Image (spheres, helix red, strand yellow):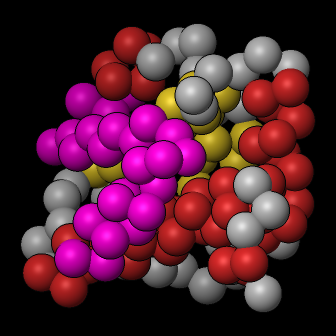
């Protein structure tokens, strides 16, 4: 089973973000093993990334490459076929990700040219992972 990690600076303070992320986490249960790591600082985030060195790491940043949902699904499928067992999405805090953290990642991904609060970015990433795995599983969710 694919391991999906979300490593982020800060937690979900707003109950509506926490509830929405929990719903997608529940939906993901049969598709992957999801773990969320909430770090207190960029330094702690970088320490966590060092512990996940074998993972394929994706930094969420505005200057990253934009992918459609289908392209993200294909990227994850290709990683799996090539033997990757864990994909980690990295979300910065209010100041974004440091260049050091971004450099530790294999891909820089942009969700939009707009900037989102990190709590909303976490929800969007969780939903897009669910969507990608649903696409790969042939589910009708994506329609």
Tell me the quadrant of the picture where the N terminus can be found.
Answer: top right
- How far across and how far down the image is residue 110, in percent? 69, 65
Tell me the quadrant of the picture where the C terminus can be found.
Answer: bottom right
Q: Residue at x 16, y 43 (%)?
A: 40
Residue situated in front as seen by the camera: 115 or 12: 12
The tally of labels here is: 0
Figure quadrant of residue 14: bottom left
Figure quadrant of residue 133: bottom right
In this picture, residue 124 sits left or right of residue 103? left
- In this view, 131 is above or below 43: below
- In this view, 50 is above or below 80: above
Residue situated in front as seen by the camera: 89 or 143: 143
For the question of whether residue 3 can be seen, the reply is yes
Figure quadrant of residue 92: bottom left
The residues colored magenta run 19-46
- How far across and how far down the image is residue 44, in percent? 24, 30
In this picture, residue 10 sits left or right of residue 119? left
In this picture, residue 103 sits left or right of residue 42? right
Q: Residue at x 23, y 45 (%)?
A: 38
Q: Residue at x 86, y 20 (%)?
A: 82
Q: Is residue 86 magenta?
A: no
For the question of whether residue 61 can be seen, the reply is no
- How far across and how far down the image is residue 77, in percent? 82, 41
In this picture, residue 142 sits left or right of residue 81? left
């Amino acid at each position: 089973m694919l391991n999906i990690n979300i490593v982020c600076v800060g937690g979900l303070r707003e109950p509506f973000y926490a509830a929405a992320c929990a719903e997608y986490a529940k939906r993901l249960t049969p598709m992957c093993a999801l773990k969320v790591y909430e770090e207190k600082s960029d330094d702690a985030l970088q320490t966590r990334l060092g512990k996940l060195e074998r993972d394929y790491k994706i930094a969420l940043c505005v200057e990253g490459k934009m992918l459609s949902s289908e392209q993200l699904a294909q990227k994850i499928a290709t990683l799996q076929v090539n033997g990757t067992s864990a994909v980690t999405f990295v979300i910065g805090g209010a100041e974004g990700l440091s260049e050091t953290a971004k450099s530790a990642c294999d891909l820089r991904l942009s969700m939009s040219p707009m900037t989102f609060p990190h709590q909303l970015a976490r929800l969007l990433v969780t939903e897009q992972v669910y969507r990608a795995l649903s696409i790969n599983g042939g589910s009708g969710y994506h329609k």
